[in-house]
Amino acid sequence: MGTKGLSGLEKIVFGSNTVSVVKHLTWPVICVPPGKEYGHGITKIGFACDFKNVVETTPTHFIKTFVNEFKAELHVLNVDYHNKHFTNDMPQQSALLHTMLEDIKPEYHFIDNKDIEDGINDFAEHNNLDLIITIPKKHKLLEGLFRPSSIKQLVFHSHVPVMCVHE
């Protein structure tokens, strides 16, 4: 799906068709920024991961199949700022994910940035990623009203296509 459509206040108040589709459909959706073309195919894929409940929330079979189909590199991206979101179980969750994905030999990148979406986008642009895979998380009602959705921010501001894959 393309991400061009509503602008400014309309995006905030009404959202967009793309974000609505991502939230309501259960199969993968690729959100493509305007003007993006693939002359060389998909060779470098980023997977945005928060290292929370990785066994339950990471669609490893899908990710491995997708990466293998394109014979691509996988880069696991975790964005934090001065370990603000670090929890005691993150090393264990990281180890579990490493075990789950070990046969496709991903590279892990821990990005220090105040803004998760900016950290992912900066990494994607500086490392020539062709696609970012993310898992939309369900937010509590009040959080959803007062905090912009990470997926929405990532989809609207990324210069790299974003594939949203549900748990």
Image (spheres, rainbow, N blue to C red):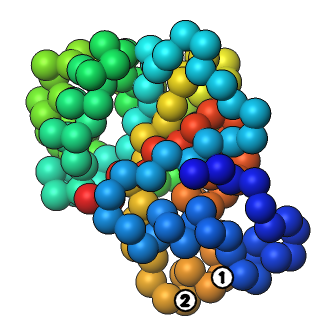
Residue 35 in sight: yes
Q: Nearer the viewer, residue 29 or 144?
A: 29
Q: Position of residue 53 (x, y in %)?
A: 22, 56
Q: Residues within 10 Å of mark 2 (few under 14, many from 20)?
A: few
Q: Residues within 10 Å of mark 1 (few under 14, many from 20)?
A: few
Figure quadrant of the C terminus: bottom left
Q: Position of residue 161 (x, y in %)?
A: 58, 38
- Check disc 1 and give the amino acid type: Phe
Question: What number is the disc on residue 146?
Answer: 1
- Check disc 2 and give the amino acid type: Leu
Question: What number is the disc on residue 142?
Answer: 2
From the viewer's perspective, tell me whether residue 79 is left or right of residue 93. Answer: right
Q: Position of residue 116 (x, y in %)?
A: 59, 48
From the viewer's perspective, tell me whether residue 108 is left or right of residue 142. Answer: left
Give yes or no for contact between labels 2 and 1 (Cβ–Cβ under 8 Å): yes
In which image quadrant can residue 12 be found?
Answer: bottom right
Q: Position of residue 65 (x, y in %)?
A: 21, 30
